[in-house]
Amino acid sequence: MKPRVLSGMRPTGQLHLGHLVGALANWKKLQDEHDCFFMVADYHALMSEYEHPAQIQEWAHDNVRDWLACGIDPARSVIFRQSDVPEHTELFAILSIITPLGWVERVPTYKEQLREVEGRDLTTYGFLGYPVLQAADILLYRAHAVPVGEDQLPHLELTREIVRRLHALLKVKIFPEPKALLTEASKLMGTDGRKMSKSYGNTLDLSESAETIRTTVQKMFTDPLRIKMTDPGHPEACNVCGYWRTFAPDRAARVWEECRTAARGCVQNKQELAEVLIKTTEPFRMARKRAGNVDRILREGATKARAIAKETMADVKAAFGLVKRSTGPAGKVRPAGKGRSR
Ligand code: TRP
């Protein structure tokens, strides 16, 4: 049996090139050797966007369209929306019961977001539980591995701690302890050289028109030490040259050399890069035009996801004495011990 992988993305906007190199390209590859579950985390999106929820479902659709365009394959992977599988909130509630307050208050992303996110009130009961819902997402499918960026590692660690606590408290073994699959993402810089992020307005969306790509690339920052075309360039310090490495690795060595020797100017470098990016994003523009079978894919994905989620919930409920143990395949309930194990 292939190891199982689950990952999720919050539908908080259109996807950009950073999502492609940071997550989607990796998801696509994982499909070959893993049993993959890819989830639209719309409850997680609501936790921060609850004041303006109108666009979330539009983005959810739009994001899935981009997933399909980049090769996430519904015949091999389960593609679904969190809110279509009510077991997510059910397990979230149960895990909340056993998760010590101190554990969630300590999660670094929580404190950081409270400090840094502007224009949203994140001091809600639900937002504190953000990583507990994420743990429920992962555990419902008994995932072995979770492809994530570095910022998500504390959430994975919390998930493992919750698993150990649940097993120790109830003397059962229901879940594998999920591992992080760190995406060795070439972190893509935004068009202004800062981290690519919608909140900086420095993104190139996957669905961008060819014309916008040309004008945006024309405005990209280059090597600040290269003023005249005859000055030798420093490609390692140039954002445009960095993009060449990421998006046309087979041509990048030559481009870098020509930049270094001033055989290639920044204008030409940008013009050619724009064409490379237009080609890279072609499938996404096409996907946008194709009328949606996204609804059907999400419906079928939810059915598959739910079948597994229900099995897990039966085991969890049995462990808590909420239902009689069925003859399911998973963990045996051993005689309950007295007292706490932690
Ligand atoms: N918190 C993740 C992010 O912001 C999204 C997410 C929700 C997720 N549930 C998940 C990622 C489960 C991996 C597994 O990127």
Image: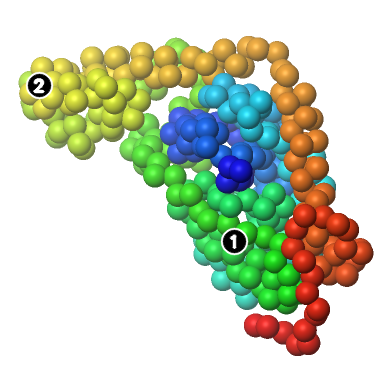
Query: On the rendered image, what quadrant is the C terminus found in?
Result: bottom right
Left or right: residue 135 versus residue 30 is right
Q: Viewer-nearest of labels 2 and 1?
A: 1
What secondary structure is marked by label 2?
Answer: loop
Left or right: residue 51 versus residue 178 is right
- Measured as percent of width and height from the top left, residue 160 is found at 59, 64
Q: Spatial distance from mark 2 to mark 1, Cα to Cα?
A: 53 Å
Position of 114 relative to 197 (above/below): below
Total number of numbered labels? Answer: 2
Q: Which residue is disc 2 drawn over?
A: 262
Query: On the rendered image, what quadrant is the N terminus found in?
Result: top right
Position of 324 relative to 201 (above/below): below
Amino acid type, mark 1:
Glu
Q: Determine which quarter of the picture holds residue 288.
A: top right
- Measured as percent of width and height from the top left, residue 123 is found at 67, 62
Q: Residues within 10 Å of mark 1 (few under 14, many from 20)?
A: many
Sequence-earlier tag: 2 or 1: 1
Name the mark on residue 177. Answer: 1
Q: Residues within 10 Å of mark 2 (few under 14, many from 20)?
A: some
Q: Residue at x 40, y 41 (%)?
A: 185
Q: Residue at x 64, y 40 (%)?
A: 37
What secondary structure is marked by label 1?
Answer: loop
Amino acid type, mark 2:
Ala
Name the mark on residue 226. Answer: none
Position of 231 relative to 156 (above/below): above
Left or right: residue 3 versus residue 202 is right
Q: Determine which quarter of the picture holds residue 252.
A: top left
Q: Residue at x 76, y 37 (%)?
A: 304
Q: Residue at x 45, y 53 (%)?
A: 150
